[in-house]
């Protein structure tokens, strides 16, 4: 049995153990968590590390397919501009596989053990089959023309079939409120009911998304129209985007709401009223890259939501590092306890991806992986700018 100790252990569920150790089998299965109450004695074979031990990170939202777009897009211009630029650059994609391999390797080195990954194609399939990381693939579908809904959905089903034939867990999910017709939502929801599927949707990433649903005006409407999207059959609801589309999704499914940059207490209340299975995924560095704005993270925390952490893509981020996302949150919200941040980055993400029986926390019988956070500020119990993650298992 391998015994690993450190100055502190954070279990992933909020517990902080001082000078304690974890016992693990050769395959990484946790056999024991020993809380010494700070009184660590010399034990044969004990490995002691200077730093904080945490479970392997869970990246609840990524786009491996977009890894080739690193350093290609303009920062801080807002989501409508980002979408327009992204569409142009995607038309000249090249050597996608090489960049996906590099992104997968980067996440592994950053201590990430599981990823909820958005896919529009099968470009990431071969890499996911070989990866040391566990992936849940969200096959993303979009289309605002209700008359094309069946064709749009059929294409997604073909992609889904390819992933499942290769024994890779996957579900069909909507892209965003502003890009999916009511008919397409109906098809997605019907399949989700049949399969007890988990869903993921980009949510309130720009204020113009709400404006579109309230009055069918704004930058997002202008950008969609510039693409030739026919909005004549799409009607504003008079309400914000989240409550408008939430009722089109199954109450019993786990729903990952991603970004939430402009979500308010009203949105939170309506979500709580509708479903108890929502998770709120934060991708702070992508939010700063695109909109130069963060969600009201303290508000989300005060509402005791299942908050998770994602990296988004290298199109909107410089690095696929959960630790870097936590640094950004801590910089802007220093009052949030570090153990809460770790829970968001581990156990909550595992719950959202339905893998909390195996990963996300230090508990007997689990194989969550073990990360060591080095260069830690013990006096203030928080990260330093130079803090880094060292993957031990």
Image: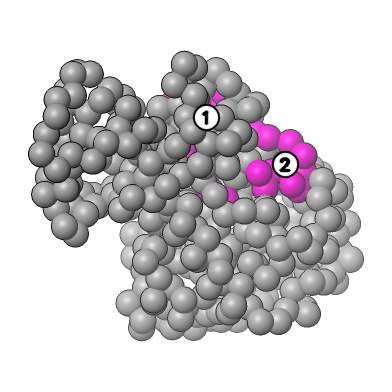
Number of marks in picture: 2
**Which residue lies at the image location 71% right of the left edge and 81% below the top edge?**
94
Highlighted magenta segment, given as a residue range: 285-311
| 235 on left or right of 295 | right
Q: Is residue 334 above or below residue 251?
A: above
**Which residue lies at the image location 67% right of the left edge and 75% below the top edge?**
147
**Which residue lies at the image location 42% right of the left edge and 47% below the top edge?**
390
| Residue 290 covered by magenta stretch | yes
- Dot in front, 1 or 2: 1
Q: Depth check: give the residue in front, 170 or 309.
A: 309
Helix, strand or loop at disc 2?
helix
| 231 on left or right of 62 | right
Q: Tell me the tag on residue 383.
A: 1
Q: Depth check: give the residue in front, 386 or 88.
A: 386
**Residue 201 position within the rendered picture, expressed as x and y whole percent measured from the top left:** 56, 54
Question: Which image quadrant is residue 92 in?
Answer: bottom right
Instruction: Please give the residue where the numbered disc 2 appears in the rendered image.
Output: 288
Evaluate whether residue 86 shows in this view. yes
* Residues at discs 1 and 2 in contact (Cβ within 8 Å): no
| Residue 325 covered by magenta stretch | no
Q: Is residue 335 above or below residue 368?
A: above
Choose the circle earlier in sequence order: 1 or 2: 2
Q: Is residue 58 above or below residue 263?
A: below
Q: Depth check: give the residue in front, 185 or 136.
A: 136
**Which residue lies at the image location 50% right of the left edge and 66% below the top edge?**
104
- Using a 10 Å C-alpha cutoff, classify the residue at mark 2 as few (fewer than 14 neighbours), some (14 to 19) or many (20 or more): some
Q: CA distance from mark 1 to mark 2?
A: 20 Å
Question: Which image quadrant is residue 210 in?
Answer: top right
| 79 on left or right of 194 | right
Q: Tell me the tag on residue 354.
A: none
Q: Is residue 33 above or below residue 227?
A: above
Question: Which image quadrant is residue 345 in?
Answer: top left
């Amino acid at each position: 049995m391998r015994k690993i100790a450190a100055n502190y252990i954070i279990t992933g569920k909020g517990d902080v153990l001082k000078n304690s150790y974890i016992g693990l089998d050769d395959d990484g299965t946790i056999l024991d968590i020993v809380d010494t109450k700070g009184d660590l004695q010399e034990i044969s074979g004990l490995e002691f590390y200077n730093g904080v031990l945490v479970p392997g990170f869970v990246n609840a939202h990524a786009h491996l397919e977009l890894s080739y777009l690193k350093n290609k897009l303009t920062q801080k211009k807002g989501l409508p501009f980002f979408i327009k630029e992204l569409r142009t650059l995607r038309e000249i994609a090249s050597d996608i596989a090489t960049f996906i391999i590099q992104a997968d390797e980067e996440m592994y080195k950053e201590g990430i053990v599981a990823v909820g990954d958005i896919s529009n194609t099968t470009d990431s399939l071969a890499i996911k089959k070989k990866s040391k990381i566990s992936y849940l693939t969200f096959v993303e579908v979009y289309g605002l023309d209700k008359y094309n809904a069946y064709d749009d959905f059929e294409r997604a089903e073909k992609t889904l079939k390819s992933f499942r034939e290769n024994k890779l867990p996957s579900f069909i999910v909507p892209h965003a409120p502003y890009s999916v017709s009511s008919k397409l939502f109906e098809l997605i929801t019907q399949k989700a009911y049949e399969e007890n599927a988990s869903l993921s949707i980009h949510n309130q990433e720009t204020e113009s998304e709400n404006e579109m649903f309230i009055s069918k005006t704004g930058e997002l409407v202008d950008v969609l129209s510039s693409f030739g999207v026919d909005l004549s059959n799409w009607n504003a609801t008079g309400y914000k985007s989240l409550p408008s589309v939430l009722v089109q999704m199954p109450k019993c499914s786990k729903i990952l709401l991603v970004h939430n940059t402009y979500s308010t207490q009203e949105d939170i209340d309506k979500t709580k009223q509708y479903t108890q299975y929502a998770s709120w995924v934060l991708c702070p560095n992508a939010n700063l890259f695109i909109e130069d704005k963060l969600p009201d993270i303290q508000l989300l925390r005060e509402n005791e939501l299942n908050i998770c952490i994602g990296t988004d893509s290298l199109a909107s981020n410089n690095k696929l590092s959960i630790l870097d996302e936590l640094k950004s949150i801590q910089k802007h919200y220093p009052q949030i306890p570090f153990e809460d941040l770790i829970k968001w980055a581990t156990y909550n993400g595992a719950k959202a991806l339905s893998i909390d029986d195996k990963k996300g926390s230090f508990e007997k019988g689990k194989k969550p992986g073990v990360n060591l956070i080095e260069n830690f500020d013990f006096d203030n119990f928080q990260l330093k700018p130079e803090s880094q993650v060292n993957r031990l298992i």
